[in-house]
Amino acid sequence: MSDKKRIVSGMRPTGSIHLGNFHGALANWIKMQNEYESFYFVADWHALTSEYENPSNILQNTQDMLIDWLASGLNPEKATIFVQSQIKEHAELYLLLSMITPATWLERNPTYKEQVIALSNKDLSTFGFLGYPVLQAADIIIYKADAVPVGIDQVPHVEITREIARRFNYLYGKVFPEPQAALAESPKLLGIDRQKMSKSYNNAIYLSDAPENIRNKVSGMITDPQRAKKKDPGDPSVCNVYEFHKLYTSETKRNDIEKSCKKAEIGCVECKKIIAANLIESLAPFREKREYYLANPSLLKDIIQSGNKKARAVASATMEEAKAAIKL
Ligand code: TRP
Ligand code: SF4
């Protein structure tokens, strides 16, 4: 056994990764794989809880997301990368946990209430959707994770996970550690329309966007909303374009831009040309790696098969312990 601490995290398969996903989660996963024993998976069963009426995209989205993970630096030599639905033990533990989870914990879950309202175009009054956090708890504790790198929105789910683990241990004897949420600071990149960047808002810049696409999207970005004309001074601190400069432009150049913007010496058109060029350049190695994986589909298959195998070995060992504790 490794003496490193263990982390587990998952992402629902939404398809290609955009810069919001990347800087919000994936960049942190890539960093953490160096210091932790890491398990990262595609939560395709979780996607089914809201997409059950139209599941036809889940498989393709899973493939697209996995390629983007690998191309952006998630490393199968360091991290165990796998697909939730390929590890049946998650479902088995989910069933056991469902026996001991009070329904009230799920009914009062703030994420649940919000999502039912936010996704009102879908009928989410299902058993599966209510049980979403129980499945998530199984995903996490089946690997005996110490920590779960997630965004702030997932903290209630990690809290329910801890409560479920504690309850299992109380009823049957200690099997599961109680995992902590590991929050990372993430930059506040918005979509090109200044709303939250999201596939469903059609405002996202993807890691895999072609240079031409990036130029077009960036040129359409909303900047400092108070700056109507080039002769008006701008305020980088409220400008979404400037947030991108913070990540993709050298400090010296960025400081120049900040000063010039405040003095109305640089126009937004020029400023956007700079960031578009820097983005395109930074993403070039990603695009190349992605092409490589697309051209060699057996490689992705092998990586996932081997990740699944490693994950399954750990998950089934935990299941044996869990069943023994319940005396099944
Ligand atoms: N609910 C998480 C999200 O929407 C995805 C997820 C599923 C997850 N299982 C997990 C995250 C286990 C961390 C650990 O982002
Ligand atoms: Fe934003 Fe750049 Fe325009 Fe200033 S010049 S408002 S930083 S896009």
Image (spheres, rainbow, N blue to C red):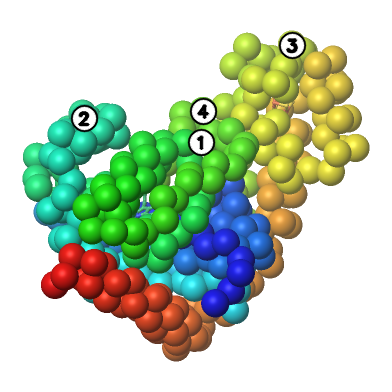
Q: Residue at x 21, y 36 (%)?
A: 105
First reached walking from the N terminus: tag 4 or tag 2: 2
Tell me whether the residue at label 1 lies in contact with that at label 2, contact meaning CB atoms closer than 8 angstroms. no
- Above or below for 65 versus 156: below
Which type of secondary structure does the marked residue at label 2 adopt? loop
Tell me whether the residue at label 3 lies in contact with that at label 1, contact meaning CB atoms closer than 8 angstroms. no
Which residue is tagged 1?
A: 191
First reached walking from the N terminus: tag 4 or tag 3: 4
Residue 267 or residue 46, whichever sits in front: 46
> What's the mark number on residue 108?
2
- Above or below for 285 versus 197: below
Which residue is tagged 4?
A: 194
Estimate the x, y position of residue 235 in percent, counting from the top left. Answer: 72, 17
Figure quarter occupied by ligand 2: top right
Tell me whether the residue at label 4 lies in contact with that at label 2, contact meaning CB atoms closer than 8 angstroms. no
Tell me whether the residue at label 4 lies in contact with that at label 3, contact meaning CB atoms closer than 8 angstroms. no
Residue mark closest to the camera, 4 vs 3: 4
Q: Which amino acid does label 2 sit on?
A: Arg
Q: Which amino acid does label 4 sit on?
A: Arg
Q: Which amino acid does label 3 sit on?
A: Asp
Distance of label 4 from label 3 (alpha carbons):
20 Å
Is label 4 within 8 A of ligand 2 (CB to nearest ligand atom)? no
Which residue is tagged 3?
A: 232
